[in-house]
Amino acid sequence: MVDNVSWTHGAHNLRFGINFRFYVHNDSRGFFGGNIVNPIITFQRTLRTAGLTNLPSGSGASAPSSSDINVIQQAAVELLGLPGRIQQAFPADFVNNVYGKGLETVYTRAHQYDSYIQDEWHVRPNITVNAGLRWEYNPPPFDAKESLVPNGNIAGGVPVSFVKADGWYKNGNLGAVGPRLGIAYSPDNKTSIRAGYAWMFDTISTFQVTAQAGKVPGFALNCVSQINTTGTITTSAGCATPAGMTNRISAGFPVAMPAPTTTPSAALSQPAYQPNGVAPSVGAFDPNLKNPSIHEWNLTIQRELPGSFVTEIGYVGKRGTHLFRAYDLNQINPNSAFLNDFLLGRQNAMSGCSPDGTGCPTGVTGQNPALLRSLAGCAATGTCSLLNSNSNDFLQNNIGDLATQIDQGNIVNRGFPGNYFRPDPQFTQIFFQDAEGDSYYHAAFVGLRRRFEKGLTFGLSYTFSKSIDDQSIDPVGAATGGGLSTTNSVTPTDIHNFGLDRARSDFDNRHVLTVDSLYEFPFGNGKRFASNIPKWLDYVIGGWSSTGIFDYQSGEPYTIYSGSQTANTEHVSTALVKGPFDPGHLQTVAGIEGPVMYNVGALITTPSDPNFDCRNVIGTATYFCIPPPGQQGSGRNTAQGPSFWNLDSGLLKNFKLTERFNIQFRAEAFNVLNHPNFNNPRNASSGTPRVNNSLFARTCCSTSSLPSSATVIAIGEPNRVLQFGLKLDF
């Protein structure tokens, strides 16, 4: 509902109005949070074999390999119709407390109540002042059936349950009042000076809400029944075993799972402790979630120049506060005692022993990591398989991964408190969304434009800018509403120190240049040359024009990661830089397909080498290293990705048929020079920014239309594209 009123009195033009919006977002999906509501039947030889015992064996070139045998066994299982598993997800109906069949649906509702008042005051003929005030009231969105939220601090050390609430969070953000002020001053007929300030607010996307709704415990129950070769049937908890599991497909193997035996409400109150991976992963909003706000200010000077040119210089500044961000509130931070024992295990592995201190070379005595043994459920002496099977974690300082694997066992039964690792042992991951993000943007720009005259128009604009934030999140909330990853660029390095991520934004392009032109050739009737020629000749040489657009952007920054969780489980740490830092540049390396940002050697794996766990930038004293256990690296977005430039051009010919009808022929070339633009390793299809990966620093092999194609609308083409067309105007 929109209503506006305008009232003019003297030098004042007063406007005020309202804008009320009522959103209905019914999000129905057959796939939600990894669960699929349609039945899935799986044939798997490792579950249920065909019992073939007379397969050929032996040795020599004619004997089948083990992989060939596996292929034969799998083919036999499929041909004989011997499924090993059936699974199906059931969406919850919390109102009726049952699990049903069909699509999973979230019934999100959101209301927005906005109002404003603004005065345009003509102080003098050459001075105009715009002043206004806008008030936005955005109450918390809610589910039309039931909004279910934690009944307490979800990571406060006290067990919580999910209970019915009026909305997905509590804060109504009544104080979202934003002033706006603009001044325009023209000292003469050829100069204009403008300045302005605005305080603006954003609201949450309903897609972020539906994503969090899908993380309520019990939202969907994934039921799995499987049978092995001996006929043993296992069914996941809360689910019913379908009849006919021992049958073949032809004899009536079940094609759907029966309704679950449990109820959705049973999942809303979880046990105080469950092992990592067994406990459900949940999501929640900060109860005091604020509206993101943006302060923007600008100053622009525009001047008319001779030759029909107009130039403009200016500055724009922005300050973002209370920006949305998402992270795992259940981040594991290994304590000092765990770290000390991890260092013992690491020293064992570097000395040639097993991490548990056994199996040492002659003359080497291993150290006993007693705490790790107890946590892993191993005896005080002897072999500890859990530690030894993760020797690479010790060698690459991956303390976070080891903590997660140990936490997947029942540490309470081993004599440790449930929250020894996770702050809230009720849950595995707590996908938490708050609004405490922060950003700055400063930009200076200059522009030059020629008004269309004598067949030519021309434009040039250049922007020099810098954007800084502590987490780059897309404005529609796809990242904050989706999942977290320990390797992506939007997951924080450490939820207890967001300052570690304060750096250039993922989308920061320091230099942006655009040049465009349109030129009508001066030939043909009414033009400078050959203005009085026969009509048939004018059809040939008249009416031609050309266009061109050139775009350039400097590269975006990206983070060089170690590839190991050296400090916590939230994210792999950034790489530690030894020696002078090299920002990198596109280069060709023999034996590697496509360009790379760095020419590096292999990861140094000799423990006695002082640069163990490092990669050297060949020909320099620079090393990218895995940080020591318990430490982070050299920071976010320190490396510079490749730049982007693109040239498009066109040749146009106008044919005048009658007074009403014209035809235009268009020959256009996009990326006319066929220049490849490569993504940085963060976005590369075959490359990675992780130093412990063999594909480190590669940008190969896909070109991109923009280095920021993941976050900015693409304006170019990866390859040259020629396009021909006819356009009819009437």
Image: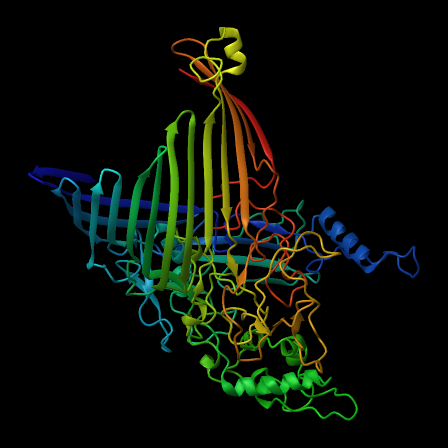
The front one of 192 and 331 is: 192
136 left or right of 598 in image: left
Total number of numbered labels? 0
353 left or right of 126 in image: right
Where is residue 77? Give x, y as percent.
73, 52
The front one of 286 and 608 is: 608
345 left or right of 338 in image: right
Where is residue 438? Give x, y as percent.
36, 63
Question: Compared with residue 380, is residue 95 higher up or lower down, i.e. above or below?
Answer: above
Where is residue 620? Give x, y as percent.
66, 69
Instruction: Confirm whether residue 219 shows in the render.
Output: no
Where is residue 226? Give x, y as percent.
61, 59
The N terminus lies in which quarter of the figure? top left
- The image quadrant that residue 371 belongs to is bottom right
Question: Compared with residue 491, is residue 40 higher up or lower down, i.e. above or below?
Answer: above
The C terminus lies in which quarter of the figure? top left
